[in-house]
Amino acid sequence: MTNEEIRNLLEKQRAFFKSGATIPVRFRIAQLEKLYAAVKKYEKEIHDALKRDLGKSHYESFMCESGLVESEISWMLRHTRKLSRRRTVYTPLAQFSSHSYCQPVPYGNTLIMSPWNYPFLLTMDPLADAIAAGNTAIVKPSAYSPATSRIIETILRECFPEEYVAVVTGGRAENAALLDQKFDLVFFTGSQAVGKEVLRRCAEHLTPAVLELGGKSPCIVDASADIPLAAKRIVFGKYLNCGQTCVAPDYILCQRSVKDAFVAEVIKQIREQYGDNPLENPDYGRIINEKHFRRLCGMIDPAKVVAGGETDPQNCRIAPTVMDHVTRDDAVMGEEIFGPIMPILPFDSFDAVVDDLKEADKPLALYLFSHDRQHIRRVTTELRYGGGCINDVVIHLATSSMGFGGVGESGMGSYHGKAGFEAFSHTKSIVNKRTWMDLPMRYQPYKSRLYEALLHIFLR
C-alpha cells in the first residue's frame, strides 16, 4: 500500500472509533465470536500456510499457533464482560459523599506489527486482546512469512470491515509508512534492533508502545536436577520451530559435575525425538530464509560440535546441534541464536552464575532445572527477566491466566488474558461527587483552626 492509502485507511478507522461502535461489550463479544469461528473454519489452511513458510507440521502448528489463538479468544469471550466493568475503589473521608471508581476504556486506533517465527499466533493473540478491549486495529504481518500473511488477510477480511480491522502487507516501506502515522497504541513483536526503531518512531507522536522482544535466555541446570528429564524438556523447547522461538533456551549453563551426563542425555533425546537423521524428518522445520540460514551457519564451530552440525543449504535446514566447551568469547554467544544450536557452558559456583546474570542484559525468559530450594528462591527473586519456568521450558507463555512480556532489553508491557486486555486499555480514575453536601474546609481563606484539625482527621 502507498503512504496515501495507509493514511486514508487510518482515517476511516478513526472515524469508525469516534462513532462509538466498538464501545458496547456485546459488539466486542460478537466480533470475538466471528474471529473464533473463522480460525476454526480455516484451521487446515492455516496449518498448510505454516508448513509452506516454516516447515511446521500440522500437529506443531495446532499446538503452538492456531490452538493457542483459539484458547486466547475463548478466554476473552468468557471474561470480556467482567473486565470491561467499572471497579469501585475506596473513597477517603475527605471526599465524603462521593463514589470513586476505575473505568477501563479502549486506547482507540491501534497498530499490531507481528514477526515471522510464529506468524499466526503473534498476530491473532494481540488482535483478540485489542478487540476485547474495544479498539480498532491495523495488522501488519511479516513479509518473511507470506503464506501465513495471506491466510490472515483472508480471515480478517471475511470477518471485519477494513474501517474496524484491516491488514497491511508488504515490507520495510509499509512498516515505515505505518510508523509515520499517529496511532493511539503500537504493539510490536520482533527483534531488539527493530524494537528500538519502533520506540523511536512512537516517541515522535508520544504514542505508547508494547514491545515484545527477545535476547539470550539462559537455562541453568544444577547438580540437583533430574538430568534425563531436564534433557528431554530442554531438547523439546530448544529445537521447537527449529529453534526460532523467542523464549527458547538460548544457551545452557550446566554444573560441571553433571555436565557430561547432561550432554549424553541431550544427544540421546535428540535421537529419540527427531530420529537418527533429523534432516529427513518431515515434522522438523526449517530456517525462515537463506539470510538467517547463513547467519546461523556462521555461529557453528565444528571443533566444538558434539552432536548435529549437518546442514541442507538447498532447503535452509540445520540439524539439531549441540556445542560443548563453549566460552563467552565464542561467536555463538555474541547474539541471540534464534536457531537449532545449543551451546553448553559449564559452571562450578552457582553464586557466580547468579552474579554474572545480574550484570547481563535482562532476558525475555530464564529457566532453572533444580531441586535446591535456595537456588530456586534466588533465581525467582534476585534475577530480572520477563518470565520463565522451574524444571521446564517455554510453557509459561501457553496460558491466558498469566501475562507474558519482557523487561528492559527484552521488552516492555505484557499481554495474554487479563494482562492483554489491560495492555490495550486505558484505566480512567473517576470521582463522582454528590452535590447535596460541600465541605468548606478546602476553600480559602484558610483561617479556621477547627477546619485544620478536621482536615488532619479526614486525611489520615
Image (spheres, rainbow, N blue to C red):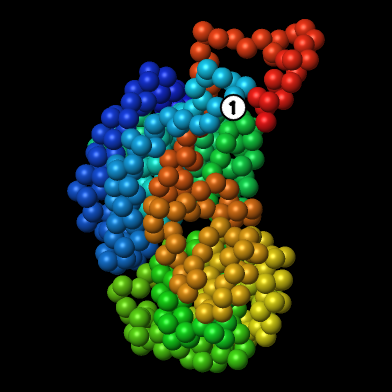
Residue 296 position (above or below residue 6):
below
Q: Is residue 302 visible?
A: no
Q: Is residue 262 visible?
A: yes
Residue 280 position (above or below residue 108):
below
Residue 90 in the image: x percent, y percent?
53, 31
Residue 323 position (above or below residue 3):
below
Residue nearest the viewer, comparing 303 with 28: 28
Residue 164 in the image: x percent, y percent?
35, 29
Label 1 crowd bin: few (<14), some (14–19), many (20+), radius 10 Å: some
Residue nearest the viewer, comparing 456 with 40: 456
Left or right? Give the position of 45 relative to 376.
left
Residue at 69% across, 82% down: 349
* Circle 1 residue: 92
Left or right? Give the position of 42 relative to 86.
left
Residue nearest the viewer, comparing 311 with 275: 275
Left or right? Give the position of 156 relative to 447.
left
Residue at 56% across, 40% down: 209
Quadrant the N terminus occupies: top left
Quadrant the C terminus occupies: top right
Question: Based on the displayed image, in which of its 4 quarters is residue 440 positioned?
Answer: top right
